[in-house]
Amino acid sequence: MSPSGDGNDQRINRSRALWGALALGALVSGCALTNPPPAHHAPTRAVQPPPPAAKPPAEPTPTHNATPTAPAVTAPPPAAAEAHTATVESTTESPSNPFQPLPTSVVLTPALRALLLQTQSYEAAKDFDAADACLTRAVRIGAQNPWVWIKKAELRLAQADRPQAAAYARKAKVLALHDHEAAQRATALIAEAVKSTP
């Protein structure tokens, strides 16, 4: 081959290599323009919003129909008012309650004890007729017992029959020679009966 032919071949080869490089460069730069690489940013942490503050409890909204709540003055219950009235009436009629419970230390026959306890329950219910009937039977079986006459005196005092109450209490005091408690109760009944007797 001639030297000029080699030079031409070398030039052609260089031109081809140059065009190949240019084509490759254009191809790479075209890809770079169509798909730009993602920008490298510093990784960011997701910022979370602060927790909501606790809300104070909502005050109830006043309604137009609501009335202001003022402390009301309440009247005593009817039962308490009746009890108070009964107490006032009893204190105006007689200064003290004439009925006293039968002492547990009193020695009585079972029948007499039952009659006197039944008399007390009738007295508490203010059923004076039934109490008097019980005491009439008690006199039949225990006329020598001072507590029978004490109960009769209490009943007459509650019925405002003071002279008869004093008479029964005196009889009880006479019978209570060996019963100190019965003698004391009879003396108190006599004093209560005679203090307002005309």
Image (tube, helix red, strand yellow):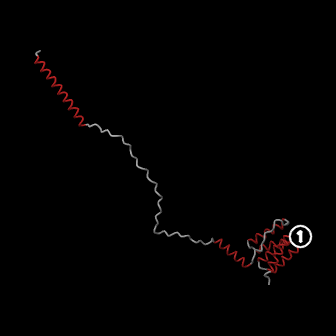
The quadrant the N terminus occupies is: top left
Residue at 77%, 79% in the rendered image: 160
Secondary structure of the residue carrying tag 1 is loop
155 and 1: which one is in front?
Answer: 1
- From the image, tell me which residue sits under label 1: 178
Query: Residue at point 40% right, 49% down?
Result: 49
Tag 1: residue type? His
Horizontal and vertical percent position of residue 145: 86, 71
Q: Report x, y in % for residue 45.
A: 38, 43
Q: Residue at x 11, y 17 (%)?
A: 3
Crowd band around label 1 with a 10 angstrom C-alpha radius: few (<14), some (14–19), many (20+): few
The residue that appears at 48% across and 68% down in the rendered structure is 66
Eyeballing the image, is 21 above or below 113? Answer: above
Residue 132: x, y in percent? 79, 74
Image-based side of 152 in relation to 13, left or right: right
Residue 3, placed above or below residue 125: above
Residue 13 locus on image (x, y percent): 16, 22
**Quadrant including the C terminus:** bottom right
Residue 121, picture quadrant: bottom right
Please identify the quarter of the rendering in which residue 133 is found: bottom right
Residue 153, picture quadrant: bottom right
